[in-house]
Amino acid sequence: MTKSIASVKGSSRMVGSRLAGTIMIFLFLTILGIFMALPIYLAVIMAFKPVQELFVFPPKLYVLDPTLDNFRDMFRTLSNLWVPFERYVFNSVLVTVCVTLAQCVFASMAAFVLAKCRIPGGTFLNKLIVVSLLYQSNVIYIMQYLIMARLRDTYWALILPAVASPMCLFLMRQSMASVPDAMIEAAKVDGANLFTIFWKIVIPNQKPALMTMMIFAFQAAWNIQGGSLVSRESLKTLPTAAAQAASAGLARAGVAMAAAVVMLVPPVVVFMLAQRQVIETMAHSGIKE
């Protein structure tokens, strides 16, 4: 009887400690989520504030008199630039689609070779990819300009530098490494070549990873501006035009916030559509045979 009472008390303590741990994790994630969502909330609030509310001190976390004037001013300013507004949108859509498709194709093919093919220096290349994740893109700006100088003022100058992505390559390699080698060996026994194995066996099982890679690629490509490689106005993207429209200082602070909200919408929509696939990929990317 005494042992049973002790076991019940012990189990109650374990349940209580688990419940307390769950509550602490929930509170931590809630605070972290609020902290991450706060910049987006502030950008949206500032976009709907009239000019007289933008410079109120201390700043308020809500809008007293919501208005759409900032969005009207933004579209009016963009429409009065050197080229039609539709041209900036076309450039951004073209560059984003090309970069996203190119990253999905090249990262998938390279990841398959690194994950499932025995090549000389494969281990070194895998480590090199991991190391490359530590570097920001600013490190390669000078070398990139020297290579791409001949392609200035072309769409290639916007697309080619963004095609290679260490993050997407690392993600696809981790996902493809979880594919059982027995499936590939069985396909080789049946006479399938590497491309057939890649296209008909590995890729159909990589939908979650492809969706995740597409989100990362879309977000990065949508924010491409071109920098010093593009000076022709007809080739500039929507982020560049939005930055030009908001470059008049404090007088266009509301326009800048409206442009930030408009630029935020497409990546958020793409992420929401593929959110389930992203979660599934993150849960299984580290599983191996």
Image (cartoon, rainbow, N blue to C red):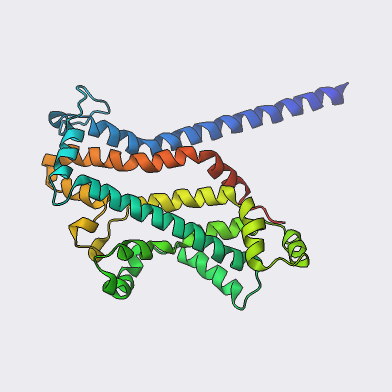
Name the quarter where the N terminus is drawn.
Answer: top right
Name the quarter where the C terminus is drawn.
Answer: bottom right
Q: Position of residue 249 (x, y in %)?
A: 13, 46
Q: Residue at x 35, y 35 (%)?
A: 38
| Front residue of 258 and 12 | 258
Q: Is residue 208 left or right of residue 183?
A: left
Q: Position of residue 74 (x, y in %)?
A: 18, 39
Q: Residue at x 27, y 60 (%)?
A: 226
Q: Position of residue 164 (x, y in %)?
A: 44, 64
Picture quadrant of residue 197: bottom right
Q: Residue at x 77, y 62 (%)?
A: 186
Q: Is residue 67 left or right of residue 114?
A: left
| Front residue of 48 and 197 | 197
Q: Position of residue 117 (x, y in %)?
A: 65, 70
Q: Residue at x 25, y 61 (%)?
A: 227
| Front residue of 119 and 85 | 85
